[in-house]
Image (spheres, helix red, strand yellow):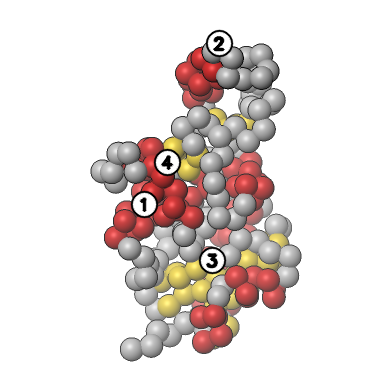
Amino acid sequence: MKKTLKHAIFPTRDGFVGVLASEKGLLSITFPRSSTREAREELGEQVNDAIESPDCFADLIKRLTVYFGGSRVLFHDRLDLGDATPFQRKVWEAARLIPYGETRSYRWVAERIGRPGAARAVGQALAKNPLPIIIPCHRVVASSGELGGFSGGLQMKDRLLRLEGILVHSTMRGVYFRSVRHAITIAREVWYPKARHGKLAASPPRPPLFSD
């Protein structure tokens, strides 16, 4: 039986966002794009069979608009993940547990789903996430604190993390901390040992600067 699909494209502070859903739940959401055409194209061919129904997404549109305005928002929406593999479902469900304004590592997700050592596979599953923001894969970073990969590009990942107020080291571009304790741990366990063994071209980084 063919799904009944609906879609909407709407403006946010960062650009136009597209959303597609079936009667079971959300199917896909785009990153902010510079035009409605780009957002529609990113939704894929299924959008051609979908009815444009912005009223059906009124609450979600409001929450996404607020999110891109820099405020904390919850997304407990129903999802249609019928095309996902069991492994992808587990990874995406684990990613949804990461709170706003915090990060977890690929290793954390792997351990959470009972697959320690599968951090690389976790990254591959997150790269296929059809519902960014709703499934906050941007909150998953490398154990070292570096960004890791991102299907929307590292610039977008950087933007989303900063939007949520995640602390960033003042001199190390692309390295994020979920707390002062996390920053100290990364400095002690990653940067300083590398510096002592000559694996860093520069001297050990200065302590991170934080602002309240």
Q: Secondary structure at mark 3?
A: strand
Marks 3/4 in contact by CB < 8 Å: the verdict is no
Instruction: Estimate the spatial distance between the alpha carbons at disc 2 and disc 1, rounded to whole Å.
Output: 36 Å
The residue beneath circle 1 is: 91
The type of residue carrying mark 4 is Tyr
Instruction: Estimate the spatial distance between the alpha carbons at disc 3 and disc 2, rounded to whole Å.
Output: 45 Å
Name the residue: 51% across, 21% down: 190
Instruction: Estimate the spatial distance between the alpha carbons at disc 3 and disc 4, rounded to whole Å.
Output: 22 Å
State which quadrant residue 201 falls in: top right
The type of residue carrying mark 2 is Arg
Residue situated in front as seen by the camera: 139 or 186: 186
Q: Badge 1: how crowded within 10 Å, few (<14), some, or many (20+)?
A: many
Q: Badge 3: how crowded within 10 Å, few (<14), some, or many (20+)?
A: many
Q: Secondary structure at mark 4?
A: helix
Q: Give whichever of discs 1 and 3 has the lower sequence position.
A: 3
The residue beneath circle 4 is: 106
Q: Nearer the viewer, mark 2 or mark 4?
A: 2
The residue beneath circle 2 is: 196
Please indicate whether residue 50 sits to the left or right of residue 163 in the image. Answer: left
Q: Nearer the viewer, mark 2 or mark 1?
A: 2
